[in-house]
């Protein structure tokens, strides 16, 4: 029996100690730990990787601190449009949703697409119909509203009106994700996001695009990314890691670090990712100031981090 392992992330970008109160820092660590616990409870009982990443991401979506589910950011017209994806490395089955609002946990909607349809991705009203038919819980705008996200939208729109919008990566980075390897050596990845603050209505990032922000294949790795989504898409970041492992014989760590530091980092692709292989190895590289992240493996303690 192989050693199980799990990693989670809650976004990356300009995370400065000066901007994070001690209370807020404690809250972020607690949110990451809660997600790890949700996945660990499944893996420690012999459960499947795909179930563990689902549970972990649901926990992150329920925590308003993170930009997914309940804490999703707003588009330029004051709406919330959420994307999510899940992939099972044992079968390469995958499901994704884009531009949805309503399901309490968008990752569950993505899983419904994977398990009940012949498709990989559904968007908008048709994705919602599938989620409704599956009996998923829905919430209204009050549930998803957070003052901090609304204030961030107003701040960004004010800057745009003055023509002085900054390029703070923190405005582009807001994603949660999980990767896992179970005791049978099967791996899986799940990712969920509200996207970018003040993004154009209808914008879809890398999160629901298989091979960009989400990927899993037992033969190589499971990956969940967070960062400048457009660059992750252009450089097929997650698939590139798998390709380097498959064709160049690189280790998980070598492949992931090359993609993050070079393919992404040298092309305005600020961000990071978490990845695991079928031996349970974990790597969590990032090329910016910080990334909310954590991991746990069989027999090891829970560990959560924000800075380098």
Image (cartoon, grey):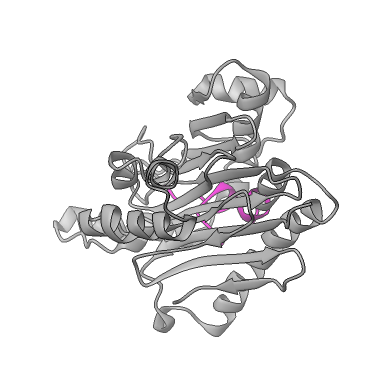
Task: Give the residue at the far left of this rendering.
Answer: 163
Give the answer, above or below, for where 242 lies relative to 114. Answer: below
Report x, y in % for residue 241.
41, 47
Number of numbered discs present?
0
Task: Give the residue at the far right of this rendering.
Answer: 45
Q: Quadrant of residue 171?
A: bottom left
Give the answer, above or below, for where 240 lies relative to 41. Answer: above
Report x, y in % for residue 88.
62, 36
Residue in front for this viewpoint, 79 or 29: 29
Residue 19 in view:
yes
Residue 251 is covered by the magenta coloring: no
Report x, y in % for residue 81.
46, 38
Q: Residue at x 65, y 39 (%)?
A: 139
Give the answer, above or below, for where 232 lies relative to 99. Answer: below
Q: Can you say which quadrant of the picture contains the C terminus?
A: bottom left
Residue 158 lies left or right of residue 71; in this view the side is: left
Give the answer, above or below, for where 226 lies relative to 111. Answer: below
Report x, y in % for residue 67.
50, 54
Residue 41 lies left or right of residue 175; in this view the side is: right
Task: Give the residue at the far top of this rendering.
Answer: 118
Residue in front for this viewpoint, 100 or 246: 246
Residue 64 in view:
no
Q: Residue at x 58, y 70 (%)?
A: 28
Residue in front for this viewpoint, 44 or 196: 44
Residue in front for this viewpoint, 76 or 283: 283
Residue range of the region highlighted in magenta in the rendering: 57-74
């Amino acid at each position: 029996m192989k050693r199980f392992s799990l990693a989670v992330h809650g976004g990356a970008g300009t995370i400065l100690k000066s901007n994070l109160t001690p209370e807020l820092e404690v809250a972020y660590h607690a949110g990451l730990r809660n997600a790890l616990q949700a996945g660990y409870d499944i893996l420690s009982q012999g459960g499947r990787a795909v179930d563990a990443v689902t549970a972990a991401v649901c926990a992150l979506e329920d925590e308003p601190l993170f930009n997914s589910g309940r804490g999703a950011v707003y588009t330029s017209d004051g709406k919330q449009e959420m994307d999510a994806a899940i992939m099972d490395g044992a079968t390469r089955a995958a499901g994704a949703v884009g531009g949805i609002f309503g399901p309490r946990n968008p990752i569950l909607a993505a899983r419904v697409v994977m398990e009940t349809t012949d498709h990989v991705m559904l968007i908008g009203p048709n994705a919602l119909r599938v989620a409704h038919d599956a009996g998923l819980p829905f919430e209204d705008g009050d549930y998803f509203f957070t003052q901090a996200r609304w204030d961030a939208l107003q701040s960004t729109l004010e800057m745009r009106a003055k023509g002085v919008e900054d390029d703070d990566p923190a405005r582009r980075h807001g994603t949660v994700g999980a990767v896992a390897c179970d005791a049978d050596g099967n791996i899986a990845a799940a990712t969920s996001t509200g996207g970018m603050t003040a993004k154009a209505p209808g914008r879809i990032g890398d999160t629901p695009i298989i091979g960009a922000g989400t990927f899993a294949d037992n033969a190589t790795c499971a990956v969940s990314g967070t960062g400048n989504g457009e660059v992750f898409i252009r450089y097929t970041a997650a698939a590139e890691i798998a390709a380097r492992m498959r064709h160049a014989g690189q280790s998980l760590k070598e492949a992931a670090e090359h993609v993050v530091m070079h393919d992404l980092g040298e092309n305005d692709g600020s961000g990071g990712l978490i990845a695991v292989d079928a031996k349970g190895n974990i790597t969590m590289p990032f090329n910016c100031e910080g990334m909310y992240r954590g991991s746990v493996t069989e027999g090891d303690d829970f560990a959560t981090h924000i800075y380098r």
